[in-house]
Each structure stands twice: as structure tokens, then as C-alpha cells.
Image (spheres, rainbow, N blue to C red):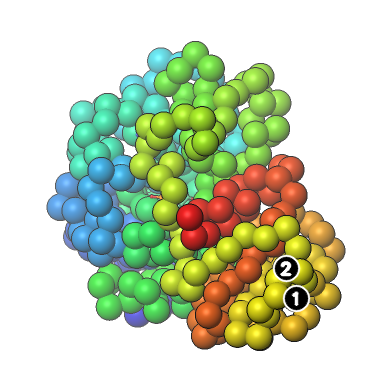
Amino acid sequence: MIFSSSEENIKKAAEVILAGGLVAFPTETVYGLGGNALDAEAVARIFEAKKRPSFDPLITHIGNLAKLDELADIRDSRIYDLAEKFWPGALTLIVPKREIIPSLVTSGLDTMAVRMPDHPIALELIRQSSGAVAAPSANSFGYLSPTEASHVEEDLGSRIDMVLEGGSCRVGVESTVLDLTRETPIILRPGGLTRQEIEAVLGPVDQFNRTTTSPTAPGQLEMHYSPRTPLHIVDDPSLVPDKAGAAALIYSDPSRGEGFAFSEVLTPGGNPVEAASRLFSALHTLDQSGAECIYAERIPEEGIGRAVMDRIYKASEK
Ligand code: TXA
Ligand code: MG
């Protein structure tokens, strides 16, 4: 059930988390499905509610920097440079974990994913509960990520205790996952924070490339974030022959969507940040339109456009 994010309801949600329950909450990227990261049973419930395979590790969300040293065994000072510059924000760091983190959270890995989300409701909830909240995106495994409370309610509502209302997520794509356990850090998942922003602090970093490297983290698996309607990527949707029963996901030029039964334009002004913020809502809308298939226009991969194109690619039929 969706609850307004009143002070009283956030307090109630924190109690639910401390009691081992599950609360979906807004972050600046997407809605998360939160449970106490320090309680293995609560973490098991997250996997169950999402029908997520237990080999796919979760991100632990913190509400203040002091918590980081309690959970992780930090020996690399670069993490503090990044945390100072980008937290709270759309950056998830892979760092060595301490014993206190149950191995279910990390799927048995000796590293953990940690981030401080940039959202007042998320921060309050984390601080008032266990201070360490495990939260994957609040969607069934493999389905589109939620950027509205209603997306969560439709998908998982009957399987979780509460959904906190926080409106539309500002960034709209998940956090950038950066593995800091190597000499040259590597971006495992492109996301809300761009490679350029990270490199301005760290110098050159690597970027996982799904076509040349085998996956080391399950988030790199190809089928993910998919609508139920088959999705095909095309350079120019206006050139598709069978438009009648189909839907189009257009980057900026509305005329490219003419003739389709349904169409959504991500950013009429051609702004990639706006495109990211609207992506999952547009895909949810097109998925529910009843169209036989969705043609998605290839978009420019500069800056956050890289993360947007990554999600469109993962949503497509292979
Ligand atoms: O923006 C986000 O990151 C959202 C919000 C709710 O914070 N969360 C999110 O969680 O996207 P999830 O579970 O959908 O994605 C977590 C990603 C996965 O790709 C997972 O494989 C990776 O983080 N991950 C987690 N722990 C890891 C580890 N120890 N090593 C490498 N990758 C890890
Ligand atoms: Mg996810």
C-alpha cells in the first residue's frame, strides 16, 4: 500500500524495517525495496519478494559517512575523495566488506556495494532504522525499474509491507556502479553519475564492456530491465514499415513517432538528463499500451546518454 511520506509514516516505515519487514522508498535514481542489511532474514525476504536469484548481490544504503567504516574495510583513500564529492548521490562503490554484513547481501562475495542516496525521505528512513538498508530497485527481477510509487505498487504491492510516496525520481536511471577494489577502478554499470564526472576526481577509469568482457557481476547480465512487450532498437523509427499496432520510444523529434499507435518522446529539447529522468516512465506507459512491440530510437551515448542507452539495450530483444 502507498503511504504519504509524513514524518509519522517515515517513523512507522523505519519500525517496519527494524522489525525485519520490507519498505519501498524513493531515491533520486529509482525506487528501492529496502530491508535491514544487518538482518539476514530481512534480506532473504527482499530476494523472495523480487523473485531475484540469490547470486545477484544488493546495494547497502547508508545515511551518513560514519557508517561506512563500520560496514566496510576501507584501506583505499580514494573512496573518501569520491564520497566527499558525490555523496549523497548516484554513485555506488564496490569495496571490501566487514563481517557485520551478512553474506546473503553480497551473494557470498567478500566485497560489498554501498551508496548514500540523495533523497531526504530515503536518508530519514535509513537514519531512523538500522543505518544500513539493503535495497535493490523495487521491481520484480528482470522487469523495468520503478520511477513512480505506482510502478512499485502495481508490481510488488501485495508482497511488501509499505510503499513510501516520493513522486517521480529526479535522475531516473540507477546509480553508476564503480569497482574500487582494483588499481584502475572500473565502471561495472553506467548510471546517473557520468564517467567524465568520476574521471575528473580519479583520473582515467575503465568501463566494463559487455561485448568484449565476460561478466563478473550479475548486473552485467544482458536480460534486465525489460518491458513485457518485445522491444527493438532502430536508428530511425520513422522508417519502420509496420507502425499500425506498434509503439515508438522517440528521443526528441515527435515527427518520428507519427503513424505509430502509441509514442512517447523522451526529451523534446534534446537534453540527455531529461531523457534519463523520463525513460522508465515512458517504457512503463508503452508497455501498458497494448502495442504488439516497441521500437526504440537509438540515442546519443554522451554523458548520461550512455546509461540510458545501456538500459534501452537491456530492454531489447536479443
Ligand atoms: O540506483 C540504484 O543503484 C538503485 C537504488 C535503489 O539505489 N538500486 C539498484 O540496485 O539499482 P540493484 O540491486 O538493482 O542493482 C545493484 C547492482 C547490480 O548490478 C549488482 O550486480 C551490483 O550492483 N553489485 C552489488 N554488489 C556487488 C559487488 N559486491 N560486486 C559487484 N557488483 C555488485
Ligand atoms: Mg535492478
Whole-angstrom CA distance, mark 2 to mark 1, is 7 Å
Q: How far across and down, in percent of the image, does residue 198 sit?
A: 64, 30
Q: Which residue is mark 1?
A: 257
Q: Residue at x 28, y 38 (%)?
A: 106
Q: Amino acid at mark 2?
A: Pro
Q: How far across and down, in percent of the image, does residue 14 sit?
A: 32, 61
Q: Residue at x 70, y 26 (%)?
A: 200
Q: How far across and down, in percent of the image, does residue 314 sit?
A: 50, 54
Horizontal relation, residue 35 to residue 239: left or right = left
Horizontal relation, residue 136 to residue 274: left or right = left
- The image quarter containing residue 108 is top left
What is the residue that sits farthest to the front in this orientation?
Answer: 241
Please indicate, yes or no, whether residue 193 appears anywhere in the rendered image. Answer: yes
Q: How far across and down, in percent of the image, does residue 214 sit?
A: 41, 31
Q: Residue at x 70, y 32 (%)?
A: 196
Q: Which residue is mark 2?
A: 237
Q: Residue at x 42, y 21 (%)?
A: 181
Q: Of helix, strand and loop, which one carries label 1?
A: helix
Q: Of helix, strand and loop, which one carries label 2?
A: helix
Viewer-closest of 6 and 166: 166
Tell which circle, 2 or 1, labels the residue nearer the N-terminal end. Answer: 2
Viewer-closest of 18 and 294: 294
